Image (cartoon, grey):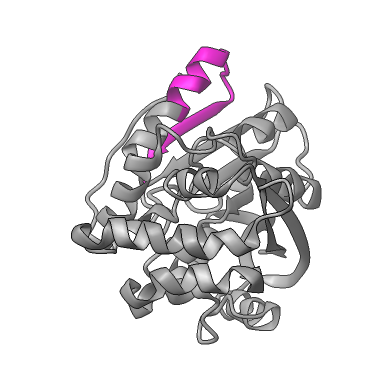
Amino acid sequence: MAKLRTRGVDKARQTVAGTFDRSAETYESVGVDFFKIFAHHLLTDVPLNPGSRVLDAGCGRGAVLFPAAALVGPTGSVFGIDLSPAMVDRTAHEINARGLTNANAVVMDAQEPDLPPRSFDTILSSCVVFFLPDPIAGLRAWRDLLKPGGRLGVTTFCGNDPRWSAVEDVFRPNIPPAMLWAMANPASPFATTDTFHRALESVGYRHPTSKIRTHEITFTDPQQWITWSWSHGQRVFWELIPRQDLPAARSEVLARLEPLREPNGALRMCQQVRYTVAHR
C-alpha cells in the first residue's frame, strides 16, 4: 500500500516542489521519451539483485521506481521519495493500481531524508541531485543511508547541445546564480566528471566511476518542444520570466527554434548525461 507523508520545507524547496506539482499532470506524457531513457541506462549500470532494498531519491513519476521494483522482485523493496506531493500522489496511485506490494512512494525531502541509517543496499537518483539546495549535503545524507558496501547510482546532465545555445539564452537573464547548473555553470560540482567524483569522495564515497552517454531526443515540431519544456523541471525557467513578458519570450523561442528544424520540420536535441556509480 502506498503512503503519503509530508514534511516542512523552506522557500527554496517549496519552489522546486511547486514546479513539479504543476508539471505532474503532463510529466513524461507529451509524446517525448526522456527520463525513462536515462532510467533504463542507470539500471543497466547498477544492476539490482532480487531481495535488494532500494531507495529512489526524487522518484518523480516512477521512471526508475517501477523497473527497479520488477528487478528486486517480491522479496525486495523500492522506497521512493519526492518533494512534490502531486508527483507522489500520482506515483502512489499507480503503485496501487499495479497491485505492487514491494514499492512505496512518500513525500520527503531528498536532501534530508528522515530514514534510518544503513537501511539500503542501493540508492538511485536520476536527474535530481542538482535540484537540491545543497547537493553535497544530500550526497552525504544518502551515504549515511547505505549499508556498508552499498552502491549509489545517479544521473546528472553534463553538457548541452551547442546548437541550442541561442534558445537557452532567452531564459538565461532571469535565472538566479544558484540555478545556473542548468546552463553548464563551470563553478558547479557537476561541471566535469572529475569535479563530481571529487565531490563524492569528499563525503566518503569510494571508487566513483562514470559513463557519459549522448541521447538524441526528437520533437515533432517547435510547439512540441515548448509543451515538453513546460512538463518537467525546465518549467521553472519559464516561470521565472515575468508574466507580462511570457508571450514575447515564447515568440522569441519559436523564432530561435526555426533554424534548428530538420527538413521534415522536426527538432533534434543531443543531450549528454553522466551515469555515475560509487560505493560506501
Instruction: Give whichever of 87, 145 is nearer the camera.
Output: 87
The image quadrant where one finds the N terminus is top left
Image position, residue 148 (x, y; %): 66, 58
Residue 176: quadrant of the picture: bottom left
Q: Is residue 189 left or right of residue 215?
A: left
184 or 266: which is nearer to us? 266
5 horizontally vs 39: left or right: left
Q: Residue farthest to the front?
A: 263
The picture places residue 118, in percent across and down from the top left corner, at 56, 52
Horizontally, residue 164 falls left or right of residue 193, namely left
Q: Is residue 95 magenta?
A: yes
Identity of the residue drawn at 41% across and 70% down = 170
Furthest toward the bottom, the residue is 187
Q: Position of residue 260 (x, y in %)?
A: 64, 61
* Residue 182 appears in the figure: no
Front-lying residue, 162 or 139: 162
User: How many labels sit on residues?
Assistant: 0
Asked if one can make out residue 61 in the rendered structure from this viewpoint, the answer is: yes
Q: Which residues are magenta?
A: 91-108
Residue 13, how many percent across, how many down? 29, 57
> At 67% across and 48% down in the image, what residue appears?
266
Q: Is residue 252 above or below residue 48?
A: below
In the picture, the quarter occupied by the C terminus is: bottom right
Q: Which residue is at a point 79% across and 65% down the rendered structure image? A: 211
Above or below 13: residue 210: below
Residue 126 painted magenta: no
Question: Residue, x 25% and y 54% (percent of image)?
Answer: 14
| 56 over 268 or under it: above or below | above
